């Protein structure tokens, strides 16, 4: 059960940015204005059928009073992106969470290097507009399949952004492709790297940055919801509630959250895909099998917390701080 204080918002405009990406503009439904946000923030959007999905805000934080989202219709969607494309129309009232930011700009950085892959442009677009308005140094590299599949292209062509935007098209000639090795070759103190996009793109960029010696503290990234966790090799295990000593069996076809809920123990959830961190729970004994995209590799290696919405166990028993 989520403790999210839901807000009501109305779809003021819905347009297609590309064949498969729609742009949604949400405004307050009622007297209360929408809460302010910072660049890199996202909201939870409650969709018909009870699905909850996270979407980054793509407009500038100073552009108050509205939230602009970009949503890709994914063929393998578990229903979230299809629901946005099909069920939401101009005038539809939706429930959203207040904005949260796990992908904030580094304070005091000398320069910001923004790398977007496809729909990963959304939080970086907000950052670019904010940095341009503040007069801060940045460059945005935006990799897409083709000009036709490049969302927010006209906004990026505006005079205040265009000189800092570099497009890289998969179907373009070799000279315009992103030369990651050259771009990341010389990490410097004060230069921060931000990456958002599909998993393969992010792994590629982060691996190149680490290989070139970029310190972790200068790497910022956000994974998307949408990747379904593969439970095909899942086995059963037990979790024990530290507060009561109660032991609960987690069957192979259940998540820990589901097994706990079946026994009347509610853990707050939102994405249920290991992306948002809402369900994060402390582990007191045992070793989790991390399946999430939320914790960093270092945090996962500590094995003292896990995301019970998708992660499992490497040991027969996990003792949870519940
Ligand atoms: Fe989002 Fe578990 S509910 S990470």
Image: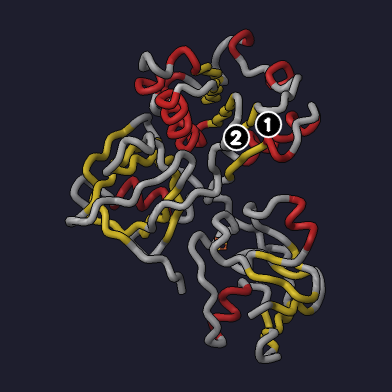
Q: Are marks 2 and 1 in contact (CB under 8 Å)?
A: yes
Q: What x and y, as percent, mark residue 190?
A: 66, 28
Q: Residues within 10 Å of mark 1 (few under 14, many from 20)?
A: many
Which residue bears the numbered disc 2? 195
Residue 226 visible to an observer of this rendering: yes
In the displayed structure, does residue 302 sit left or right of residue 27?
A: right
- Quadrant location of ligand 1? bottom right
Q: Quadrant of the C terminus?
A: bottom right
Q: What x and y, as percent, mark residue 18?
A: 37, 29
Which residue is depicted at the point 46% across and 74% down?
1
In the displayed structure, does residue 311 sit left or right of residue 141?
A: right
Q: What x and y, as percent, mark residue 112?
A: 58, 27
Picture quarter containing residue 130? top left
As drawn, the label of residue 205 is 1
Picture quarter containing residue 133? top left
Which residue is depicted at the point 29% across and 52% down?
87
Which residue is depicted at the point 34% across and 40% down?
68
Q: How is the image coloured?
A: secondary structure
The residues bearing labels 2 and 1 have C-alpha atoms spaced at a distance of: 7 Å
Q: Residue furthest front?
A: 108
Q: Is residue 207 above or below residue 51?
A: above
Q: What x and y, as percent, mark residue 28?
A: 24, 51
Q: Residues within 10 Å of mark 2 (few under 14, many from 20)?
A: many
Note whether ligand 1 is within 8 Å of mark 2: no
């Amino acid at each position: 059960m989520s403790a999210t204080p839901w807000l009501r918002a109305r779809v003021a405009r819905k347009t297609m940015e590309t064949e498969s990406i729609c742009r949604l503009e949400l405004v307050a439904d009622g007297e209360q204005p929408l809460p302010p946000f910072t660049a890199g923030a996202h909201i939870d959007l409650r969709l018909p059928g009870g699905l909850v999905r996270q979407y980054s805000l793509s407009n500038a934080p100073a552009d108050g009073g509205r939230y602009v989202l970009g949503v890709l219709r994914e063929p393998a969607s578990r229903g979230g992106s299809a629901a946005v494309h099909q069920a939401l129309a101009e005038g539809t009232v939706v429930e959203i969470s207040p904005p949260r930011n796990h992908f904030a700009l580094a304070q005091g950085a000398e320069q910001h290097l923004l790398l977007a892959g496809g729909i990963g442009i959304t939080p970086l677009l907000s950052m670019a507009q904010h940095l341009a308005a503040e007069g801060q140094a940045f460059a945005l590299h935006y990799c897409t399949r083709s000009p036709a599949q490049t969302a927010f292209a006209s906004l990026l062509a505006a005079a205040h952004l265009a000189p800092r935007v570099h497009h890289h098209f998969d179907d373009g000639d070799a000279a315009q492709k992103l030369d990651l090795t050259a771009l990341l070759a010389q990490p410097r103190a004060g230069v921060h790297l931000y990456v958002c996009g599909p998993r393969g793109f992010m792994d590629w960029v982060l691996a190149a940055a680490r290989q070139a010696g970029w310190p972790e503290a200068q790497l910022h990234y956000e994974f998307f919801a949408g990747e379904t966790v593969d439970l095909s090799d899942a086995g059963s295990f037990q979790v024990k509630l530290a507060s009561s000593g109660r032991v609960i069996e987690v069957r192979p076809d259940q998540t820990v959250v589901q097994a706990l809920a079946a026994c009347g123990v509610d853990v707050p959830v939102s994405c249920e895909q290991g992306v948002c961190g809402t369900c994060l729970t402390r582990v007191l004994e045992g070793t989790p099998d991390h399946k999430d995209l939320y914790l960093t590799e270092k945090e996962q290696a500590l094995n003292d917390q896990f995301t019970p919405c998708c992660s499992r166990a490497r040991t027969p028993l996990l003792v949870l701080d519940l």
